[in-house]
Amino acid sequence: MAHRSFRPRAWLIMLSSASVVTGCGEREFDEARAFRHLVDQVEMGPRAPGYPGHGQALDYFRSHLESRADRVFLHRFEVTSPLDSSVVELQTVVAVFNPDSPTRILFGAHWDTRPVADQETDEALRQLPVPGANDGASGVAVLLEVATALAARSPKIGVDLALFDGEDLGRPAEAETYALGSARFVEDHPDYRPVFMVNLDMVGRKGTRIPKESHSVLGAAWLVERLWAIGREIGTTVLVDSIGPPVFDDHIAFLRAGIPAVDLIDFQDPNWHTTHDLPEACAPESLGEIGRLVLAIVRDAERTLRP
Ligand SMILES: [Zn+2]
């Protein structure tokens, strides 16, 4: 998969040379509560279009975010599912903090789950939907708890949290059939240009370790290095200094639009796209590490970007 890379503008260079400030934890990230959000989603059953859990999860996200963010909106659209050619309605949920600030950063995660467990070795299991504890629920669980933390003290810059639908309806080995929600979001919002985007996917596995995803390194090396520097400053245990495989994920549409974007993803999960992608294989500590990293990225952006 090829996409254009770009040169960072002058202020981006300023950003990457500024010192990292770790702050004093005035926005708390409660990893136990985040883990509860993960379990709650899995208990709704599959969150693939057409399942009752799809609608139920949407209500859960809206009610949680509407009481915390300054504004919540839905990005709704229909697509033909690449998997079975049915027409499905997809809905991305966006929570907006500090809507008046022209300087915005975006965190994303997909909330839909894969309707087929096509990585199962047992053929009979391949038609079943995945529970999506790590692949789906984990990134969303972190962002729901980040919303609670941001509600405690409003950010000085604009912060948007996008829960993308339609990430996992793709056909195996056909990358472009994945990440439909984010692609359509970027297409339908041509004037929305956050300073950068950070995507969270499969971040909840016990003992999770996240390398530098290859498309992110090619398209936004300075941002990767910045996030890793912030991670070192706060002593995070989850970011590792190696290059990971390229993943076609919800950050790609942003990179293609010239918006710096990084995918934080642990693609080594042995339960990926199987019926074993369950909360038992996930841990509150992993969500806590990622959640505190997200809040540190917000703090850093507050210090280094013009509000
Ligand atoms: Zn997936």
Image: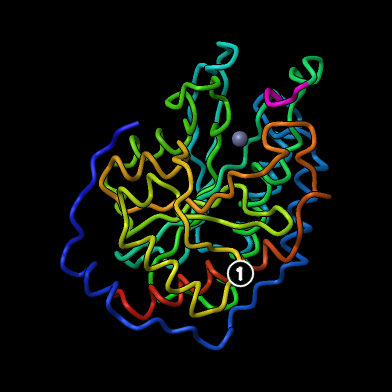
Q: Compared to 57, does 150 lie above or below?
A: below
Extreme front residue here?
Answer: 242
> Where residue 194 sits in the image (x, y, percent)?
33, 56
- 20 magenta-colored: no
Quadrant where the N terminus lies? top left
Residue at screen point 75% across, 45% down: 41
Q: Which range of residues does the magenta coloring cover? A: 117-121
Quadrant where the C terminus lies? bottom left
Residue at screen point 75% across, 63% down: 284
Residue at screen point 46% across, 71% down: 298
Q: Which residue is mark 1?
A: 237
What colour scheme has been applied to the protein in the rendered image?
Answer: rainbow
Q: Compared to 5, does 33 lie above or below?
A: below
Extreme bottom residue here?
Answer: 24
Q: Tell me the amino acid under the disc marked 1.
A: Thr
Q: Residues within 10 Å of mark 1 (few under 14, many from 20)?
A: some
Count of marks, rendered view: 1
> Where residue 185 sits in the image (x, y, percent)?
41, 38
- The answer to which image quadrant residue 288 occupies is bottom right
Specify whether 178 is left or right of 5: right
Q: Ligand 1 lies in which image quarter?
A: top right
Label 1: element kind? loop
